[in-house]
Amino acid sequence: MNTELTGKRAVVTAGAGGSGLVIAQGLAAEGAEVFVCDVDETAIGNLPESLTGSFVDVSDPDAVDAWLAPIVADGIDILINNAGIAGPTAAIEDITTEDWRRCLTIDLDSQFFCTRAVVPAMKKNGSGAIVNISSTTGLMGLPMRAPYVAAKFAIVGLTKTLAMELGRDNIRVNAIAPGSITGDRMERVIAAHATADGISEDRVRAMYTQGVSLASFVEPEEISDMVVYLCSARGRRITGQVIAVDGGTETLYPRELS
């Protein structure tokens, strides 16, 4: 174990699986006490002993407040707003109001709910680090993914505004914009894209990597490394930034394969 974050208390939403779990483990490996929430009860039950897990639907503000209140009462130093869903892959005219609202509530509103709950304690302590997970889709857009893209763009605005609002309280707020992260969620996105466009999953995967300078997807550990850096003393003068960890995304939707 490193000691970079020893004595720090951290919260990670959607931290029982995927990149959220890797982020939580990365923080714990640096010495932080880490609390995670998720809606996957099986995954919560299988968490390593280094993490404390709870079942929480982050789209429910009352549930978020009930979860965070006892954690915050004992102090909070780090918040990682990681929870999110891919939302529908469809033309704008085919997206239902329910699907639009569900995507924005989970991907965007949850970050507001969690941040609102922890900021008073961070202000009292005179310090804090918040990392919001956005996406490269929050920088350049992506056809057929309007709700997701809208949420990720909004996270950028929220991040920059909160960095300005909270800076005098020594609370730093940054966003990470991952590219395509390897894992089950990305495979589901690829499958949905292939179905929507009537092409093979291999073609979709090739399209995605063709649009990246390093011609590869991102590993969850690479996102975790950036989170740890931003939350540690090494990132003490970094705030209000949107940092892409994406291999150099040139386009998210190349129309033709070379």
Image (tube, rainbow, N blue to C red):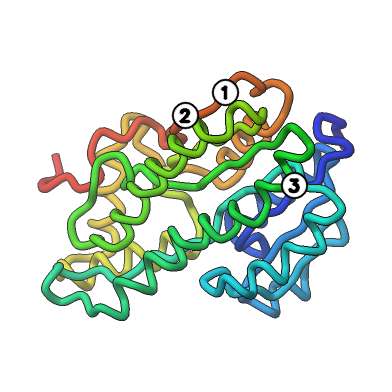
Q: Classify residue 123 as left or right of residue 100.
A: right
**Residue 198 drawn above or below residue 81:** below
Q: Earlier in the sequence, mark 1 or mark 3?
A: 3
Q: Which mark is residue 238?
A: 1
Residue type at mark 3?
Ala
Q: Which residue is mark 3?
A: 121
Residue lying at 87% horizontally and 36% vertically, measured from the top left: 6
Contact, mark 1 vs mark 3 (Cβ under 8 Å): no
Q: Nearer the viewer, residue 163 or 56?
A: 163
x, y percent for residue 227? 62, 38
For disc 3, the neighbor class at 10 Å (few under 14, some 14 to 19, many from 20) is some
Asked which quadrant contains residue 215, the reply is top left
Residue type at mark 1?
Ile
Residue lying at 49% horizontally and 30% vertically, measured from the top left: 164
Q: Helix or strand or loop: what does disc 3 sit on?
A: helix
x, y percent for residue 34? 79, 52
For disc 1, the neighbor class at 10 Å (few under 14, some 14 to 19, many from 20) is some
Q: Which residue is mark 2?
A: 241
Residue type at mark 2?
Gln
Residue lying at 43% horizontally and 58% vertically, measured from the top left: 108
Q: Helix or strand or loop: what does disc 2 sit on?
A: loop
Q: Earlier in the sequence, mark 3 or mark 2?
A: 3
Contact, mark 2 vs mark 1 (Cβ under 8 Å): yes
- Quadrant where the image shows the N terminus: top right
Q: Helix or strand or loop: what does disc 1 sit on?
A: loop
Asked which quadrant contains residue 105, the reply is bottom left
Q: Classify residue 197 as left or right of residue 38.
A: left
Q: Which mark is residue 128?
A: none
